[in-house]
Amino acid sequence: MKIFDNNLTLEKHNEISNFIHKLLNETGIVNPPTPVDTLVNAVKLKLIKYSEAYKELFGERIVNENKKPDIYGYINFDKKIIYAHPSQRKFTTFHEITHKILPWHNKYPGFSPHIDNKNTILRKPIKLLDYEANLGASLLQFQIDRFDQELKDLSLSLNSAIKLSTRYSTSLHSTFRRYVEKNNKACALLVYYADFTEEPLFELYYPIQSKSFTEKYGKIDWPSSVSPGESLFDHFYSNKTGEITLKELGINDNCGIDLAYNNYHYFVLIYPKLAKLIKAVKKMRIKRPYKTTSPVISKKAVAKKKSIKTWN
């Protein structure tokens, strides 16, 4: 049995893709961006506010504003309501919609009502049902493999991913992640957050490596934190793109580094400079020597060149 995306078999991945494809077809969605409200209405759900979700879960109990529960998403199958956190509204809404359209989720004992937190939405979830919902959400917002095909025509950079984020109306976070996961070039995305409580420090949230990057360098043990004096820190602090050497991590090639920030996390794209060099070489036109049969150079021009004297 072939395993796909670490946790899912290829058969299960295709089954989920078929449900997503059917929903997109039934709603007539053929071009990006994928409209949230259209899908919410199509599956007969109601998107509620945080206060309503909190009341559904905890009744009239009042909690300290600074200690609100970590509710990123919520679904109640019986009441047909969902909640999505504003910072990841689109992805989380599609996550909950996937819960709704996959029949085995609805039938899973004790699953509804279901709360999604930061781990089930942004990190690698523990529960298989949440992993499946994340896959469905990604397929919905990036319209199966349309995004994957379009990124092949763009240069390797976070600017390219940002252009796709605008086109698909998706968050930078989910777009950067998909951009690296589905890229056939060697590249890695490091997601960090700043912690300046005691001293300037950047903590690793999680890393992602493209398939070709892992094939080339193996699974890299990326630094869990970056502090002053380290090369990565200098790039972070000054928002400096360019080149970086990572031989201490077992990467002997000179690497390019690209950075972005979305008010929540710092994103770092690492790629071997060779990846861009190969693409540049392929685009170069090989010039023919002077003695060419090309009709661009006329006989008159050749005769004129021979008549020019040179000084010794």
Image (spheres, rainbow, N blue to C red):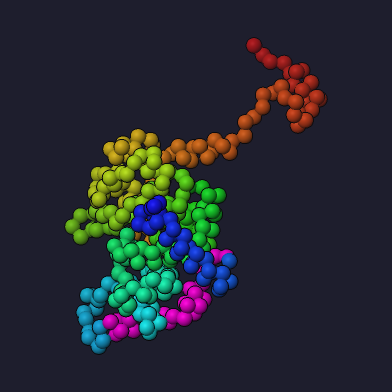
In percent of the image, x 30 and y 75: which residue is there? Answer: 109
The quarter of the displayed image where residue 52 is located: bottom left
In percent of the image, x 42 and y 72: which residue is there?
A: 103
Q: Report the quarter where the C terminus lies.
A: top right
Task: Judge by depth and name the residue closer to the eye, 26 or 265.
Answer: 26
Magenta stretch containing residue 55, yes or no? Answer: yes
Above-or-below relation of 220 to 123: above
Q: Residue furthest bottom?
A: 60
**Residue farthest toward the top in the current orientation of the protein:** 312
Question: Could you tell me how many numbered marks the image carries?
Answer: 0
Write the start and end of the magenta stretch as one range: 31-57
Instruction: Name the residue rendered at 33%, 52% in the picture.
Output: 207
Residue 35 picture location, percent across and down: 51, 72
Q: Is residue 199 visible?
A: yes
- Where residue 95 appears, x then y in whole percent? 40, 69
Q: Is residue 132 above or below residue 61?
A: above
Point 64% across, 29% down: residue: 287
Nearest the viewer among 207 and 75 is: 75
Question: Residue 36, relative to residue 15: is it above or below?
Answer: below
> Where is residue 49 shown, x and y percent of the image?
37, 81
Residue 159 horizontal/vertical position (percent):
47, 53
Residue 139 seen anywhere in this rendered image of the structure: no
**Image quadrant assignment for residue 194:** bottom left
| Residue 8 among those drawn in magenta | no
